[in-house]
Amino acid sequence: MKILIIFLIIQTPWKKLFKTFKMDERDFYIKDEYMNFYGGGKGKLFIYDVFRKNPFVIENYIKTIAGIIIQRDTLPNFLLSTASFLINKNVRRDLIKNPVKEYWKGINKKGLSKIISFYIKATQNTKKWIDYAFEEIKRDSILKLIKSYFYEEDSKLLESSIDKVDYLYLFTGAMDFCLIINEIIDSLKNCDFENEYYEKTPYGDIIIRGKENDTILLENPFLVIDFGGDDVYISKLKKIPYFSLIIDVSGNDVYKANSFSFGAGILSYSVLIDFKGNDKYYCEFGGLGSGIFGTGMLIDFEGNDFYDGKVFGQGAGAFGSGILFDKKGNDIYHIYQYGQGFGYHLGSGLLFDKYGDDKYIGEDKDIIFPSPQTKEHNANLVQGMGFGKRADYIDGHSLAGGIGLLIDYKGNDKYSAGVFAQGCSYWYGVGILFDEEGNDSLKGIWYVQGAGAHFGVGILLNLKGNDFYYAEKNMAQGAGHDFTLGYFMDEKGNDKYFSPNLSLGAGNANGMGIFIDKEGNDEYNIKKGINLGDANLKLRFLSLRKNMPTYGVFFDLGGRDKYKLKGRNKKKWFKITENNEYGFGFDK
């Protein structure tokens, strides 16, 4: 790490910045001794401090994290391993040996019968980890509180349960379940469909279907395998089982549910795997790769798919992990709030799309969650959003945010949302949007594109392509407000920026905004305000804040660039004030 820091600071832009500010590079971060005057919240993630205390490592760390996910995408346990590691809950069950292989022993059956027997035996041995996790509190008592919590009808009762759950046991069981799924997937490769089968067991329903077009009602799904056909799955849960696995081998399928379905680990482990077909997924609340006090996962390997939800889904985690992985196809993701890579307290949410020209939509035309910033737009909190509970103005019981990641590997993608989106954070959360390759379009309103508010870390990295960035109101494209680090980096391409007040490397109210565009002939269309490597601290009354720095940094490191309103090609500009406002811009 020290070698990396030295390498970075000797580069001309950073060297010029520190010389101008007359400071040591080791002091270039938002310090605890400042933040602790004003903020707080239990459950802060280690990766939050890694990024906040050393902005220089952000690029390489995130490239490495994304690279691990991209290279090791096939198996559920690899996806879970990364998601759990990022929230300090990594459990490596198969490091020495695979603990679930022993459950094949003593099963004297063949084909699907053997697979079913293995699944029952393995999951019932794994259930002990859930029992250990909820040993101090009844699982069913939490279940009743979950939905009302996210609609803010009740908070105290659920939050009193948070510290009574053992999350390491919870993730131990989740990892074992993923290893069980690996065994089943391998076994199915050499297994033909035998007969349709249905059994109501103490653990839930077992349903096996062939290659016909089926309508499958899910009331208590434990194991569902469908070998083909254009199927319709309708979820009307009467009970949430401890384990749920749905595998669909092929067909253009439709999945319909109101809540807690199709890869929704709600105090449980739930995985949906669809191998082939152009599929449609509908779940209003808590579905399609979501985890609340559990782990939920949706994996779709092939097809042009449509994902639709209202609240909390499509890679969303709270007190657990939610993962959505789509490998191939031109896909559409649509949700109103809390999704597409969303992490709440002690939660990790991951949406990973590997190939295809995709659309990520945070609904902003039908306004049902009006934002406090601008009531004409929804508060979406999507597309790489880390979110915590700020309670200093309520009862003081704040909760640090989780981590939300959206990773898109290849394709010409479109991202759109209202407020809080596209690598954004709030209250000790970490939000990351990583796009590796493609000519992308990103549109948002307020707090978007590597930004955040109130002690967060919001990051956007876009590596290759001629990209279009549009932000309408405030706080965008590398902007940090109120002790937040907002970080934006575009590596290659001829890019166009449409930028509002507080953007393009802007720090506000003791925040830090960093904007870096490395290569390309870029165009900056800038509105009046604090932007382009600028810092702002407006005090309504005498405050300690005037003694604490605010930073704004803008680097364009290559190409012939066009600036509308202000900024110049091949120039340097800076500002230092008595209120410790430090602004720096550099076009190389």
Image (cartoon, rainbow, N blue to C red):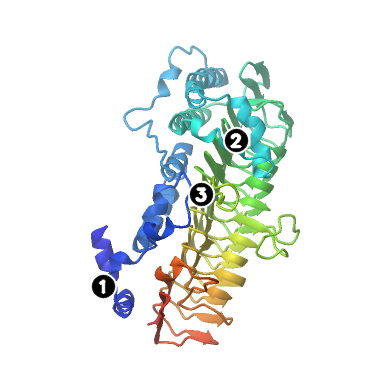
Between 381 and 396, the residue placed more toward the observer is 396
Image quarter of residue 34: bottom left
Query: Going from the N terminus, do you reach mark 2 or mark 3 first?
Result: 2
- Residue drawn 54% across the image and 50% down it: 388
Q: Quadrant of the C terminus?
A: bottom left
Q: Residues within 10 Å of mark 1 (few under 14, many from 20)?
A: few
Q: How many marks?
A: 3
Q: CA distance from mark 2 to mark 3?
A: 16 Å
Q: Quadrant of the N terminus?
A: bottom left
Task: Classify mark 2: residues with Cα within 10 Å, few (<14), some (14-19) or many (20+).
Answer: some
Amino acid under label 3?
Answer: Gly
Q: Quadrant of residue 96 in the image?
A: top left
Question: Under tag 2, what secondary structure?
Answer: helix
Question: Are the residues flagged by discs 2 and 3 in contact, CB closer than 8 Å?
Answer: no
Camera-nearest label, 1 or 2: 2
Label 3 or label 1, whichever comes before in sequence order: 1
Q: Earlier in the sequence, mark 1 or mark 2?
A: 1
Label at residue 158: 2
In the image: residue 583, left or right of residue 410: left
Task: Check whether the beta carbons of the residues at disc 3 and disc 1 lie within 8 A of each other.
Answer: no
Give me the residue at 58% from left, 24% from top.
138
**Residue 21 showing in the rendered view:** yes
Label 3 to label 1: alpha-carbon separation: 34 Å
Q: Label 2 amino acid? A: Leu
Q: Residue furthest front?
A: 542
Disc 3 marks which residue? 401
Report which quarter residue 377 is drawn in: bottom right
Q: Residue at x 31, y 65 (%)?
A: 27
